[in-house]
Image (cartoon, rainbow, N blue to C red):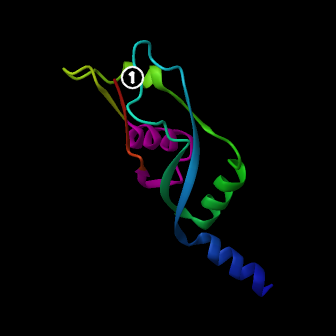
């Protein structure tokens, strides 16, 4: 009984959690290449209740996040130099807001991806 009570209280508290999100870049825009090497993982720091974190980790184990470069590049105009900077942080904020609103993103590394 005491263990169950402790578990319920612990899962109701807020926690910060840093995760490595496997990422898969798909649909590269025609005529654009990433500057530098594409990351295989994005480091994401989130905050949520213990229950929300436990649920997310159990549901998303071993799944990668597909990022459609062509779709995101189309919504970001090129600069005068022809470079496009995609905010990975903004893209992930939007994704988590829609798919996992109980998790609050505190930081993303790398925060940007540049195409040229």
Q: Quadrant of residue 107?
A: bottom left
Residue 103: say if magenta: yes
Residue 15 placement (x, y as % from top left): 53, 69
For the N terminus, the image quarter is bottom right
Q: Residue at x 47, y 25 (%)?
A: 69
Q: Is residue 83 left or right of residue 57?
A: left
Figure check: 39 above or below 48: above
Q: Quadrant of residue 66?
A: top right
Which x, y percent locates residue 61? 70, 50
Give whichever of 24, 44 is nearer the camera.
Answer: 24
Residue 8 in magenta? no
Residue lying farthest top?
30
Q: Point out the image quarter for the C terminus.
A: top left
Determine whether 82 is above or below 48 in the image.
Answer: above
**Residue with the most extreme bottom position:** 2
At x 41% / y 23%, what residue is drawn?
A: 33
Q: Which residue is mark 1?
A: 73
Which residue is located at x 41 percent, y 35 percent? 36
Q: Residue furthest front?
A: 36
Badge 1 marks a residue whose secondary structure is helix
Instruction: Identify which residue, 114 or 105, lies in the foreground.
Output: 114
Q: Residue at x 56, y 65 (%)?
A: 49
Image position of 15 (left or right of 60): left
Q: Percent position (x, y) of residue 74?
A: 38, 18
Q: Which stretch is magenta?
A: 87-108
Q: Is residue 60 above or below residue 77?
A: below
Left or right of residue 94: residue 40: right
Q: Residue furthest right?
A: 1
């Amino acid at each position: 009984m005491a263990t169950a009570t402790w578990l319920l209280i612990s899962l109701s508290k807020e926690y910060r959690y840093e995760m490595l999100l496997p990422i898969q870049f798909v649909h590269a825009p025609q005529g654009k290449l990433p500057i530098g090497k594409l990351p295989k993982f994005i480091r994401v720091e989130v905050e949520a209740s213990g229950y929300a974190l436990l649920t997310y980790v159990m549901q998303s184990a071993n799944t990668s996040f597909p990022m459609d470069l062509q779709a995101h590049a189309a919504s970001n105009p090129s600069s005068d130099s022809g470079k496009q900077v995609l905010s990975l942080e903004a893209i992930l904020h939007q994704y988590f807001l829609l798919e996992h609103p109980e998790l609050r993103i505190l930081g993303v590394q790398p925060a940007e991806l540049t195409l040229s």
